[in-house]
Image: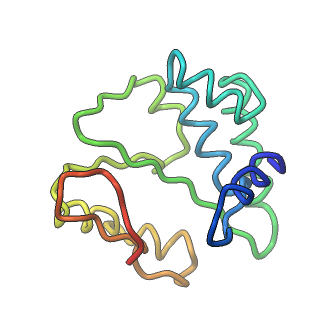
Amino acid sequence: MNGLTARWAAASKDGNVSSAAGVWPLLAHVAGGAEGAARAELEESLGLPAGQARDAARELLAAMGAMRGLDTAVRLWTKWTLQPKKEWEASLPADAHGVLTGDPRTDNRALDAGRWTVKRTGGLIDLMPLTLPRTRRWCWRAR
C-alpha cells in the first residue's frame, strides 16, 4: 500500500489527501470482478492475485474497523447497464454496491439515500461530497 500511495502522491500536481489504505480495499473488490487486462493491471497495483486481495481487503477493513476512533466504509457505484456477476456482487461487503441510472437528479438522491454517508461517518458528513454533472458523462466533481 505504501508504494501505491507514493505513486499517487508523486503523480499529484496539487497535493494529495488520499491514502491507499482507504482505496486499496475497494480496488481489491473491483479486481475480483474484473477480467483480462483490467484484472492483471489491478492485481499488479494491489500486489496480490484478485482472490487473495479480496480476502486481505476484508481483513484490512475488519482490522481498521476494530480500532477505536476509526471507521471504514466501502461503496462501489456502477452504471445501470453494467450487469455484474451475482457471485462477485455477493462477495462484496454488505451495502457496498449501488447502481446509478445516468440521470443526475435521480443519482444524486441515490448517493445520499438511506443516509449512508451520515451513518458511515458518524454524522461528520451529511451528504456525499459529489455532484453528478448534467451531461451523461460518468465523471464527478466535488460539491
Camera-side residue of 44 and 110: 44
* Quadrant of the image occupied by residue 53: top right
- Report whether 38 appears left or right of 60: left
Camera-side residue of 7 and 31: 7
- Position of residue 112 relative to residue 139, above or below, is below
Q: Residue at x 62, y 72 (%)?
A: 14
Give how far across and how far down residue 93 sits, in percent: 55, 44
Camera-side residue of 109 and 94: 109
Give how far across and how far down residue 64 sits, in percent: 77, 59
Residue lying farthest to the front in this orientation = 13
Give how far across and how far down residue 41 sits, in percent: 62, 27
Give how far across and how far down residue 45 sits, in percent: 70, 35
* Quadrant of the image occupied by residue 107: bottom left
Count of number-bearing discs: 0
Residue lying farthest to the top in this orientation = 36
- Position of residue 16 relative to residue 136, above or below, is below
Camera-side residue of 104 and 17: 17
Q: Residue at x 64, y 52 (%)?
A: 23
State the quadrant of the C terminus.
bottom left
Q: Residue at x 50, y 26 (%)?
A: 33
Q: Name the image colouring.
A: rainbow
- Report whether 42 appears left or right of 49: left
- Report whether 109 appears left or right of 61: left
Q: Residue at x 66, y 25 (%)?
A: 50
